[in-house]
Image (cartoon, rainbow, N blue to C red):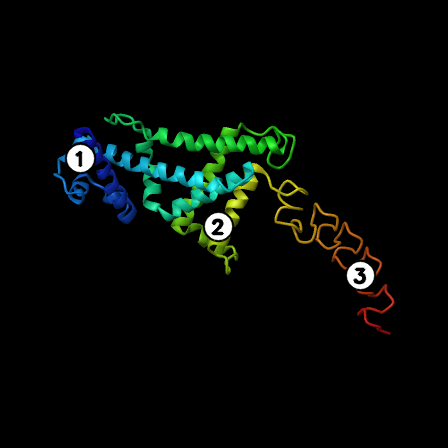
Amino acid sequence: MTDERESGLRERLIDVGVELVLDEGSASVGLREIARRAGVSHGAPRRYFPTHDALLSAIARRGFEDLGARFEAAVAGAGTPRGQVEALAHAYVGYALERRGMFELMFRHDLLDSTGQATDQPALRESTLPLFGRLTELVARCRSERGGAQGADGSDAAAPPPAVTAAALWSNLHGIAQLWAWGSLQLAFAGGGLAGNDAGDGHRERLITAVLDAHLGGVGVLGAAGAVGAFGAAGLLGALGPSGALGQSGALGPSGALGPSGQSGPSGPLGPSGALGPSGALGSLGSAAP
């Protein structure tokens, strides 16, 4: 009974620490404040957490457990490896923005390193390894489905090992989460003239998709970067752009039958103005001019 009581008190102290981090941030977490909120003596937490860092690591470990549970729930409805990676990516960024204080605590280098920490608990770093291992496994499966050791752009150049790609992918997602939380990416979108009705979730979703495409390749069947080109079903610049059948301008441009402007230019049968111009039957303005 005594051991159960001791274990229960330790878990209660961690529970209080988690609540503090979520409500007020990691800077508010201290042994004395946790003891006060838990209704125990100021010295009680020292029996379980000899140092402040040991307490913070125990709280951060809860964060990784929560994130791992979210990962499992996210991938449950995804059938393909690529779909599972996408689900993990959204879960990761979503968790970071929803639980900012915990997310920052989880990735504090001094806690992950844990060198010199006097505790009988597993190092915090060990909590991260299963999550990273899962991502690495999914990257390898995505690559296998795409045809082996090709780059994400479909080139013949050998791709880096799955662990390297997984690390790069994770780094990009972590950067999106942090920069979005700080408001930096929103400013970049606004400065680039990209702000609009979807300036919030829409832009963030596009960023995540771009990261996945960069490291895993696109999901379309008519091009490595997506469905018929880099930005969707109509190619890079519009309707079947540079890689499409309608030429560079997307609507029968320079490589198409209708000339540079996409509608009966100099190379087209209808003259420079595109609509039966000077060389056409309707004169220079294209409408029955003399």
Q: Quadrant of the N terminus?
A: top left
| Residue at disc 2, secondary structure | helix
Up the image or down, 279 lies above or below 241; here it is below
Amino acid under label 2?
Arg
Q: Quadrant of residue 29?
A: top left
Q: Residues within 10 Å of mark 1 (few under 14, many from 20)?
A: many
Locate residue 169, reporting x and y percent.
49, 37
Q: CA distance from mark 3 to mark 1?
A: 83 Å
273 on left or right of 8? right
Residue at the limit of the structure toward the front, as seen here: 1
Pick whichever of labels 3 and 1 is earlier in the sequence: 1
Q: CA distance from mark 2 to mark 1?
A: 41 Å
Q: Nearer the viewer, residue 159 or 162?
A: 162
Pick whichever of labels 2 and 1 is earlier in the sequence: 1
Query: What residue is shown with label 1?
Result: 45
Amino acid under label 3?
Pro
Locate residue 223, reporting x and y percent.
66, 42
Amino acid under label 1?
Pro
Q: Residues within 10 Å of mark 3 (few under 14, many from 20)?
A: many
Pick whichever of labels 3 and 2 is earlier in the sequence: 2
Query: What residue is shown with label 2?
Result: 204
